[in-house]
Amino acid sequence: MLNTLAEVLPVGAQKYSGKTALVCGNHSFSFIELCNLSGQLANGLRGLGVSPGDRVTLYSQNCWEWIISYYAIGRLGAVINPINVMLTPEEVLFVVKDCGARAILASQDKGEALLDIKGDSPLQHVILFGDNVPTGARSLNKVLKESRADCDSVTLAPETLSTIGYTSGTTGYPKGAALTHRNVLLNSAMTANMHVRTAADTVVTALPCAHVYGNVIMNGAFLCGMTLVLLERFNEAEALNAIQTHRATMFEGVPTMYLYLLNYPELNKYDLSSLTRCTVGGQTMTVSKMQEVEARFGCPLLELWGMTEIAGLGTTHPFYGLNRHGSIGIPYPMLSVALLGRRRRARPWIMMKSAS
């Protein structure tokens, strides 16, 4: 297993070279191209004064710029702060002040509001995706063009803070869950092992990369040499077309996505025969609907459960194992799971075991 997120794309470039790593809209990138772009951005951010330990916020829908920004921050040894794109400017202000973000990288549609809050926050730099950005912001494309791809990634201990992910919890303001590089990479690696993800796989997903579920899929794909087909947002036709066009072996989503797909009138017109397994999490799904997904998609549907505070999944069904619908599966290695209450679908309580 790798030690830090800084290693993901450089190691991927060495192992998988020109293999397609990411397809996003009309853009397609090999592992080498993603590595070079993340290196360019890391150098650009370093030139702006971003240093190891600095907090950098990511705020946009799924896109290729989000991906390279995530790994560029990791290669600097800075701390990634991925936030929900649905947050209001006031909520963004709370988060960047709470974690002390020095810079924020965001999509253009969020630009004006970010500039409005900048003066009330610790933000020194607002970097927006694209070319033509408002006065007071920097263009990510310009930062890329002015930077070299050859980047010396910072060497860090696996126990170093890598991510602060905010979760709503149950009361009050969102709370930042502090996650180390080992937390994030180990969870992605264990998930890949449980679901048997390999370089032969292509995964289609519209899950937000800023959410812990989507983040595990993203990191797992690049760790294993998979091709990640990333949709900006969920749409039935786009999801089905992506599975058919790219001969995807995996689709991953939440129950609502599967329900929309089951009810889509054109579903039977798409060739989904390449799928070998799908995953579902985020909320409960009835056994009858899970069985219907399996019947119409022609592959197992593996339920899972996780949370931001543990950097991903805590339980899931293994691909090669009993798949019991109505259950969230078995605990990961080094985890203990106990159910709170007597309800069949009660929320698990997770305890970490000693790695020794």
Image (cartoon, helix red, strand yellow):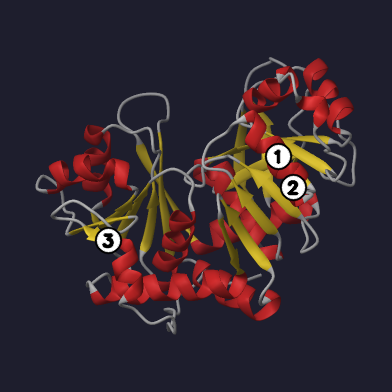
Numbered disc 2: secondary structure: helix
Tag of residue 200: none
| Residue 351 spot, x, y in % from top left | 60, 43
Q: Is residue 37 above or below residue 176?
A: below
| Residue 168 spot, x, y in % from top left | 40, 31
Tag of residue 241: 1
**Residue at image x 43%, y 61%?**
162
Q: Marks 1 and 3, how far apart in space?
A: 32 Å
Mark earlier in primary sequence (2, 3): 3
Task: Tell me the residue that label 2 is attached to.
Answer: 245
Other residues around mark 2 within 10 Å, as few (<14) / some (14–19) / many (≥20): few
To which quarter of the image does residue 2 belong? bottom right
| Residue 286 spot, x, y in % from top left | 75, 17
Left or right position of 255 against 97: right
Q: Marks 2 and 1, how far apart in space?
A: 6 Å
Task: Tell me the residue that label 3 is attached to.
Answer: 139
90 or 340, nearer to the observer: 90
Numbered disc 3: secondary structure: strand
Q: Quadrant of the C terminus?
A: bottom right
Numbered disc 1: secondary structure: helix
Q: Indicate the amino acid at tag 2.
A: Thr
Q: Marks 2 and 3, how far apart in space?
A: 33 Å
